[in-house]
């Protein structure tokens, strides 16, 4: 069952009924101001940091679902009837409801009794505000007398404090209202120099800024007193819950259309010019007024929207494909790179499943997210790499997370997730291959942001590898520390106290438990660093990394092969995890993917056998499960993984992040059909028709789909902010379609399904546009290339001479 459809031409997902199984959201903004917006306008806005600069209030896990948002109410002044064109929060019946989620904007509208209302929401480039453009049309035969009420609830900035510290917060709320603009200035009198504003293009019939006056006692957003009676109270908030609401009265002739603009923004004043007149407590508005004036003008708003559209057009234009499969095209051309940008911007901070309070920028997460965005925003990727490296410690280890506002490592979570530093090597390698900008390696970057500790970025990479080598266990395999990629495999915690963090409580010294996943990742990273060293003319060093990689690969084959697949780990007692010897958790997906990707077990049949075991034991129609059998009880020596009921999250859920590793591995060993089959199983567009099972948005990946052991097998959770986005993008574009940046040029090595006659692609790479046309003439993956009509050796298209901006590539697959 579907709740809407894709409009690929407009690059939108169109929801045609409001009661989706879960709020289906979109993101506004990509620079500093961000908003989450659901298909019924639920959600909130923030500036840079979803915890520390929250503009509007949102109540997670509320009932009814998703009922804080950017609400517009319409009221028929003749009958007193009122409704919301976005359905929520009144949930009054509407006709022709539609929500179009597009790239950085959302349009929501409906009709009721001949009054059509549609609002377009977006954040313009370069400024810190949300624009709501409301279009009202009277389709009746007679004139309509209407009232429009806007409403948002302000958050008192720190979302954590806002939701807990009521003894203080009920006293501090302050606003100013001037020329119809509502300014939210809580704490401005003391240490803040920022404010929020809520403006409207029309002359106001009234306003409200005190929530409980606007709503009336014991009423909800579905039924505000001001809307019901058709008149604002002109309330001024002092303490309690400051909000913003404008009331506009208008008459529409039959057929007449009117546009109203609302602006919700964030503004900072210079600390020495906070007040005007100086010495008063009145906000200096001279600095913000020009911004407000600009965007209350319709032409400027249209131009801003056009600029946003053009930016996405350019970003997506970097890679476009035309394959025989619609789900592949749609995800590769539109939604997957879009989701990658959202994860790049927000890491795991703010979604419908991440409250915006808990997590900052993850070291491991963001290095992986970058793999899916480096071609879209190379300059920002460069900066991100430097920021991440600056939270590395002198040991080579890394803070697991940092706060985006301060860019400082998060002490509460700390470090010692032993896979973390290795991901930095992968992200830097991806950046170098994409951009060819080797200067990044010479950038001086501090450790733990400590002045004076700077070394070239290259040394950070050296220390990353060394970090693993200095932490090897009894089998010569990497010690796991608090956890590796699987945050919930906690082999040193032994937590038996409710509420304790499974990750940060370390009971064991950690000198025994080893990770096969880190071993595979190390081999991959050491090979990458060897390639980088070789290109920096450090032949000896490159050889050393090669040798270390070979040594680790040998240790994996000697101590990490279980007979039919790769082991997952050794626990704190030196017992196997992920082995046929185990009662539960006999086979795990992660080591199969990463070891085959790292080239381990290719000389003999082991790589293939590991992937066969995955197919036989872990794959389901809804994707590949993390491990089997699921843990049916809590194992104190395994940690959080066994805390989840079977089939959910890390306990045998389909943890989608890991699936593309298997797709890549299958592609590497030449199984194009299998790789693409796995790709489609979790491809959200391909799952659209089972939306009642999948339940999350059909246009973006979710972190998890419930595994076969769960009663809700096939149900997705935790959509949007997941490494699944970047890795699926890498799997499909670089390994299945096979268009892969390398140090020498663009490699074209497709491993596509055997029944595809071929495909076409356009890739902008280092300033050159490559038009790639792939034709299948035989069943296999042997590729021969001709470049601008001339056959070439090998599968890497060399960079063209300076000045040439277009290259035609014909690839033949035999
Ligand atoms: C979450 C974390 C990520 C981790 C994964 C598996 O997605 O953000 O860092 O690798 O879970 O546990
Ligand atoms: C929880 C989640 C896991 C996440 C971890 C770190 O354990 O299940 O996915 O990575 O928290 O915060």
Image (cartoon, helix red, strand yellow):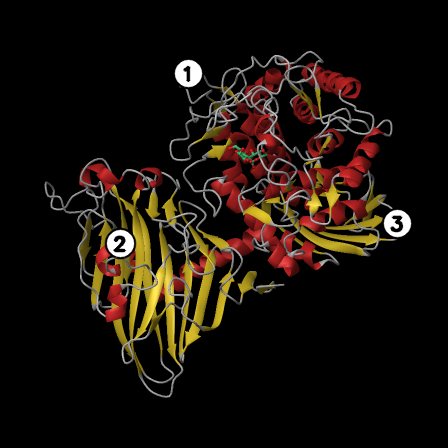
Mark 1 and mark 2 residues within 8 Å of each other at the beta carbon: no
- Provide the secondary structure element on which disc 2 rests: strand
Q: Is residue 531 left or right of residue 122?
A: right
Q: Residue at x 17, y 55 (%)?
A: 236
- Provide the secondary structure element on which disc 3 rests: loop
Mark 3 or mark 2, whichever is nearer to me: 2
The residue labelled by disc 1 is: 452
Q: Is residue 134 above or below residue 680?
A: below
Residue 191, percent from left and from top: 22, 35
Q: Residue at x 24, y 65 (%)?
A: 226
Q: Is residue 792 left or right of residue 206?
A: right
Residue 762, percent from left and from top: 67, 52
Q: Is residue 12 above or below residue 492?
A: below
Residue 264, percent from left and from top: 32, 55
Mark 1 or mark 3, whichever is nearer to me: 3
For the view shown, which residue lies furthest in the bottom direction? 141
Residue 317 in view of the camera:
no
Residue 83 in view of the camera:
yes
Q: Residue at x 25, y 55 (%)?
A: 211
- Mark 3 Cα shell of 10 Å, populated few (<14), some (14-19), many (≥20): some
Task: Residue 779: give its label.
Answer: 3
The residue labelled by disc 2 is: 243
- Provide the secondary structure element on which disc 1 rests: loop
């Amino acid at each position: 069952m579907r709740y809407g459809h894709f409009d690929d031409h407009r690059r939108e997902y169109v929801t045609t009924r409001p009661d989706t199984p879960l709020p289906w959201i979109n993101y506004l903004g990509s620079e500093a101001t961000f908003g989450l917006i659901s298909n019924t306008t639920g959600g909130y806005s923030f500036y840079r940091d979803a915890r520390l600069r929250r503009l509007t209030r949102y109540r997670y896990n509320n009932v009814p679902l998703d009922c804080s948002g950017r609400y517009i109410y319409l009221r028929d002044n003749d009958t007193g009837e009122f409704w919301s064109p976005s359905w929520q929060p009144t949930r009054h019946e509407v006709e022709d409801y539609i929500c179009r989620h597009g790239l950085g904007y959302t349009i929501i509208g409906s009709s009721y009794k001949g009054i059509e209302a549609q609002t377009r929401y977006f954040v313009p480039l370069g400024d810190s505000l949300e624009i709501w453009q409301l279009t009202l049309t009277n389709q009746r035969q007679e004139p309509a007398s209407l009232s429009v009420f806007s409403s948002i609830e302000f958050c008192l900035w720190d979302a954590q404090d806002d939701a807990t510290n009521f003894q203080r917060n009920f006293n501090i709320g302050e606003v100013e209202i001037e020329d119809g603009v509502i300014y939210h200035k809580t704490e401005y009198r003391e240490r803040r120099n920022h404010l929020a504003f809520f403006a409207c293009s029309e002359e106001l019939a009234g306003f409200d800024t005190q929530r409980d006056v606007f709503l009336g006692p014991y009423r909800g957003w579905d039924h505000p007193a001001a809307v019901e009676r058709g008149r604002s109270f002109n309330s001024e908030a002092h303490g309690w819950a400051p909000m913003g609401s404008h009331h506009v009265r208008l008459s529409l002739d039959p057929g007449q259309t009117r546009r109203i603009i609302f602006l919700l923004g964030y503004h900072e004043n210079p600390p020495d010019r906070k007040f005007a007149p100086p010495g008063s407590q009145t906000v200096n508005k001279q600095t913000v007024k020009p911004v407000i004036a600009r965007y209350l003008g319709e032409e400027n708003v249209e131009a801003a929207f056009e600029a946003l559209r053009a930016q996405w057009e350019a970003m997506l234009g970097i890679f476009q494909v035309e394959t025989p499969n619609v789900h592949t095209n749609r995800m590769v051309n539109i939604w997957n790179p879009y989701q990658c940008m959202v994860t790049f911007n927000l890491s795991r901070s703010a979604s419908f499943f991440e409250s915006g309070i808990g997590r900052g920028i993850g070291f491991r997460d963001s290095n992986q997210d970058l793999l899916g965005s480096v071609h879209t925003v190379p300059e920002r990727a460069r900066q991100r790499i430097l920021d991440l490296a600056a939270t590395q410690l002198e040991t080579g280890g890394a803070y697991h997370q940092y706060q985006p506002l301060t860019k400082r490592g998060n002490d509460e979570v700390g470090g010692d997730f032993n896979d973390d530093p290795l991901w930095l090597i992968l992200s830097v390698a991806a950046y170098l291959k994409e951009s060819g900008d080797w200067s990044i390696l010479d950038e001086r970057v501090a450790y733990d942001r400590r002045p004076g500790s700077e070394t070239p970025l290259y040394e950070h990479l050296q220390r990353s590898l060394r970090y693993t080598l200095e932490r090897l266990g009894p089998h010569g395999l990497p010690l796991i520390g608090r956890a590796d990629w699987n945050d919930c495999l906690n082999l040193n915690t032994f937590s038996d106290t409710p509420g304790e963090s499974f990750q940060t409580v370390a009971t064991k010294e950690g000198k025994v438990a080893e990770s096969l996943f880190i071993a595979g990742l190390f081999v991959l990273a050491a090979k990458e660093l060897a390639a980088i060293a070789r290109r920096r003319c450090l032949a000896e060093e490159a050889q050393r990394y090669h040798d270390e990689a070979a040594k680790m690969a040998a240790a994996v084959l000697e101590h990490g092969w279980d007979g039919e697949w790769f082991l997952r780990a050794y626990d704190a007692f030196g017992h196997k995890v992920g082995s046929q010897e185990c009662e539960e958790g006999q086979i795990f997906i992660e080591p199969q993917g990463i070891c085959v990707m790292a080239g381990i077990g290719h000389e003999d049949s082991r790589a293939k056998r590991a992937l066969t075991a995955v197919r036989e034991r872990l794959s389901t129609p809804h994707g590949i499960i993390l491990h089997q059998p699921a843990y049916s009880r809590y194992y104190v020596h395994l940690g959080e993984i066994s805390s989840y009921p079977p089939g959910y999250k890390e306990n045998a859920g389909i943890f989608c992040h890991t699936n593309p590793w298997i797709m890549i591995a299958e592609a590497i060993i030449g199984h194009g059909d299998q790789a693409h089959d796995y790709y489609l199983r979790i491809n959200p567009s391909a799952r659209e028709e089972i939306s009642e099972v999948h339940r999350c948005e059909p246009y973006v990946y979710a972190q998890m789909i419930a595994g076969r052991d769960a009663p809700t097998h096939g149900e997705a959770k935790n959509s949007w902010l997941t490494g699944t986005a970047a890795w699926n993008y890498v799997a499909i574009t670089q390994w299945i379609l096979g268009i892969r940046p390398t140090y020498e040029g663009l490699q074209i090595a497709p491993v596509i399904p055997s029944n595809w006659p071929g495909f076409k692609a356009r890739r902008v790479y280092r300033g050159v546009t490559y038009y790639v046309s792939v034709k299948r003439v035989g069943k296999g993956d042997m590729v021969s290339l001709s470049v601008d009509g001339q056959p070439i050796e090998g599968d890497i298209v060399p960079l063209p001479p300076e000045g040439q901006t277009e290259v035609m590539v014909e690839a033949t697959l035999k």
